[in-house]
Image (cartoon, rainbow, N blue to C red):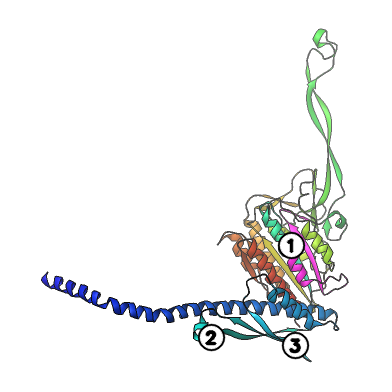
Amino acid sequence: MEIINRFKGFYQRFVKERKGNVAIIFGVMMVPTMVLMGGLVDYGMAIKTKSQLTATLDAAMLAAMLQYADDEDVDYQKIIEDYIDQNFTSSKKKLHGTVTELIAAEISEEGEMRSSVKAVVPTNFLKFVHQNEFEFTISAAVMVGGSSIEVALVLDNTGSMNGSKITSLIASAKNLVNTIMDDDDDSDLVKMAVIPFADYVNIGMVNRSEPGLDIPEDYSYSWIEKKKGKCKGKGKGWGKGWGNSKKCDEDVEKHEDYKWYGCMGSRLHDNPDVASEDYDELGVPGLMTTSNTCGYVKTVTRLTNSKTDILTALTNMNSSGSTYIPSGLAWGWRSVTDHAPFADGVPYSDKSVKKVIVLMTDGENTSEMKKVEGNGVLHHTGDVYEHDWGSTNDANTITAELCDAIKANEIIIYSIAFDVVEGSTVQTLMKNCAGNGGQYFDADNNTELADAFRQIGLSLLNLRLSK
């Protein structure tokens, strides 16, 4: 115990005697420590600014090449300069760098456009050690010419997209369109289709007579129904004319009017789109109903080079209904093929045109295929299946099979899971669906959704401009 007390006293005297030295040492070390920490802040700002300028130069080069591909006399250097000025130099974002030199863009004999930009980022803390700024040079290159593309936007319009989510989707998809499509509707470099989906896809009344569809003429179904009542007779008093309240049955003719309002059902899973594209033998059935049960689903816009039509289709989207992803995915696939029912695309054999599907959903499949029973079955090529609430195992299986079949035809798939549960079935489906150079995006909110569409837009633009 005595030894412990002696050691304690020695330690207390040592601390008292060292206080002045510690203060001096701390003061001496304070300056380099602050410079080091501040230097890390300066360096981080320089890295961030370099990344932002790199993305700006890439986008500027793509924008210049986009116009040069249509008109070789265009001043592509000015396009690059204006883009950088608008999105970096004069941007309202908190960008700390300054462009000091933009190297004139050049196009090589091989058709590659190259340009570079030099910039500086001023320091705040490193000035104490005479490091006033960071300097760096960024280079970018894109190819002249390249491929035409056909793109189907397969977009979830279900009820869960209501509110800010559908608004964000419309704005994000429009930004993608503006990135890759020319204002000139005569250009065939980019064609797009819009496929809004919920539990059904509405192909529009104008497409009723397309080959490969099984849509009967509107019809009425009549039947006789027994109605309980009182037989007429020769009674007296209160019973006069009614046979003293004797009961009897009366035949009443009834009828229902069945119409097609644009919505499409499915074919039998043993012979679906994933297994057969022979629509002559097994047409896609139209849903015949007594009322417009799917009027909330906006009409698809078939493959077109009209930017105006595509932007209008996106503007008109709304949110209602449950989720059946295979319906949207199947019609997205059909929209970029060269055969019935929508024969708007080029043949698969034409490798100069690249085919793309952008699939976006915000939730799990909630509907399944159910065979239509009753009076509304007058189809010719097989049983008709509607999409109704129930077990989703089949819907998930069909979704996966469709993705595999689409990719087997060398169609590029980008997929976006928007605000879905981490580790959920739909997240796995969407991850596995992307392929052939397409990417999967996990967007947790509206900002990340916009960024996903922005990245896809730049990727598609690069795809279009690459040889």
Residue 223 — which label?
A: none
Image location (x, y in percent) of residue 380: 83, 53
The furthest residue to the top: 237
Residue 7 to residue 364: above or below = below
**Left or right: 79 in relation to 89:** right
Magenta range is: 174-202
Q: Which residue is mark 3?
A: 104
What is the spatial separation of the Cα atoms under label 1 and label 2, in whole angstroms?
A: 59 Å
The furthest residue to the left: 2
Q: Residues within 10 Å of mark 3 (few under 14, many from 20)?
A: some
**Amino acid at circle 1:** Ala
Mark 1 or 2: the one toward you: 2
Q: Residues within 10 Å of mark 2 (few under 14, many from 20)?
A: few
Q: Residue at x 69, y 69 (%)?
A: 454
If you read the primary sequence from the N terminus, does the residue marked by circle 1 or circle 2 appear first?
2
Image location (x, y in percent) of residue 280: 83, 62
Residue 330 — which label?
A: 1
Image location (x, y in percent) of residue 277: 78, 65
Q: Nearer the viewer, residue 116 or 175?
A: 116
Q: Quadrant of the N terminus?
A: bottom left
Image location (x, y in percent) of residue 188: 85, 73
Q: Nearer the viewer, residue 297 or 112?
A: 112
Residue 154 to residue 286: above or below = below
Residue 131 — which label?
A: 2
Q: Residue at x 73, y 68 (%)?
A: 357
Image quadrant of residue 158? bottom right
**Amino acid at circle 3:** Ala
